[in-house]
Amino acid sequence: MKITRRTFVNLTSAAMVAAPYAAKAQSGGSDDPLGIRSDFPLLKHTNFLNTAYHSVAPQQVVDAGVQFYKDRANPADGIGPWIGEGRAVRASFAKLVGAQPSEIGLIHATSDAENIIANAIDLKEGDNIVTDDLQYVASFVLYDHFAKTKGVEVRIVKRDETGATTLENFEKLVDGKTRIVSVSWVSHENGYQHDLRALSNLAHNNGAYFYVDAIQGIGMLELDVKEAGIDFFGCGTYKWLLGSYGVAFFYIREELQDIITADRRGMLSVTNTEIMTGFDSYPDAAKYGFATPAFGAITVVGTALEYLHKVGVNNIENHTVPLAHQIRVNFIKLGIKTDTPMNNRSAIVTYFPDKAPAKVKALYDEENIKLTYKHGGTKIRVGVSLFNNQSDIDHFNSVSAKIPLLT
């Protein structure tokens, strides 16, 4: 690869990630088991348990973003190096999820992916879509549109008393007229992790496609898309991937790329722009990009992916999920209701304080604990991230123990 001013900046940014981690990995202790807490200065004064909403970026990622915008004071001659960086980022992300780089496209947001799919498969009256009530609202909005305009039936699996949506209940709704089974790998609503392979088999056995909203899982949990049997997924980059807003990843299985046509076209969807007619689209997932992307966000997530590769998602999963289990167990002891299923394998826990929301929030705010307040604060979500440690969890649990005493 030709080393330009731009690629030099990118390569040095990657080196900035590698060197600090290599030095610290040997010294991680009980308060810093992954050897990374010093990369997150916010933790000096804040107990951040809100990655399920959006992440704190490590300093290396912040530095990459700052450098990108500093370069705007002396801009590069063209966008070619940035386009090359996009290809490198697609390859890095593909490695993270067990895909081929050709199966990864760059889009703007998670829900772009499901829109592309739904618009490409010629939904019509008599078809049905099966999802569950743990899916993100963007999917409901999308399929409500097709219900209104094309008569597509939207079937929604309801969660049980534990907070899970079971395979058995999906089986009751999926049939030969199901076109898409759509779920979040990890639900934003309660952290429930779906059994992707089981749902994939169910969808495929009925001739349906299997779509996954993966934003709440990738970077938190290990994923192999081939083992999971996923046809497509969308994944934004501002949560567990430690990136920012404006860029997302679109996985589409290679065998389906001729079926799922791009719904928009522009300069960056074709291989040759020096002509006026007879354009050829990219033959792979690059065709789903069409216009100038958020190059800054791509730079940022490129550095974040290097960081995650160094730390190891398996290490992150094995560190964070047990801490989340501690939180759930503590709520049970306190008599506080949680709708996160027991032994659920994700780093998200949700609970119902059953007290005045403003008073509960004030309790946590006083201790500088950052959480997600859902449904007017009647439900609270905790997300344990790679940088959290046992002290963070002990602190959160001790503050939560005051909730039953509120009047």
Image: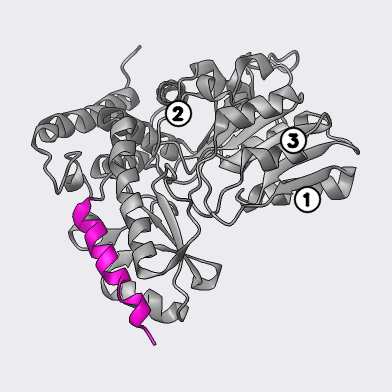
What amino acid does circle 2 point to?
A: Leu
Q: Is residue 215 left or right of residue 66?
A: right
The crowd level at tag 2 (other Cα within 10 Å; few <14, some 14-19, many 20+) is some
The crowd level at tag 3 (other Cα within 10 Å; few <14, some 14-19, many 20+) is some
Q: Position of residue 269 (x, y in %)?
A: 63, 23
What amino acid does circle 1 point to?
A: Asp
Q: On the image, numbered disc 3 is attached to which residue?
A: 118
Q: Position of residue 296 (x, y in %)?
A: 42, 39
Q: Is residue 163 left or right of residue 16?
A: right
Residue at 26 percent of width and 60 percent of height: 47
Label 2 SS? loop
What amino acid does circle 3 point to?
A: Ala
Marker disc for residue 144? 1
How far apart are the two marked residues, 1 and 2, measured between alpha carbons?
30 Å
Marker disc for residue 223? 2
Q: Position of residue 54 (x, y in %)?
A: 42, 52
As for residue 394 lying within the magenta part, the answer is: yes
How far apart are the two marked residues, 3 and 1, measured between alpha carbons?
12 Å
Q: Position of residue 76 (x, y in %)?
A: 38, 30
Label 3 SS? helix
The mark that comes first in sequence, 3 or 1, is: 3
Residue at 36 percent of width and 83 percent of height: 406
Nearest the eye: 78 or 229: 229
Q: Which residues are magenta?
A: 389-407
Nearest the eye: 267 or 157: 157
The mark that comes first in sequence, 3 or 2, is: 3
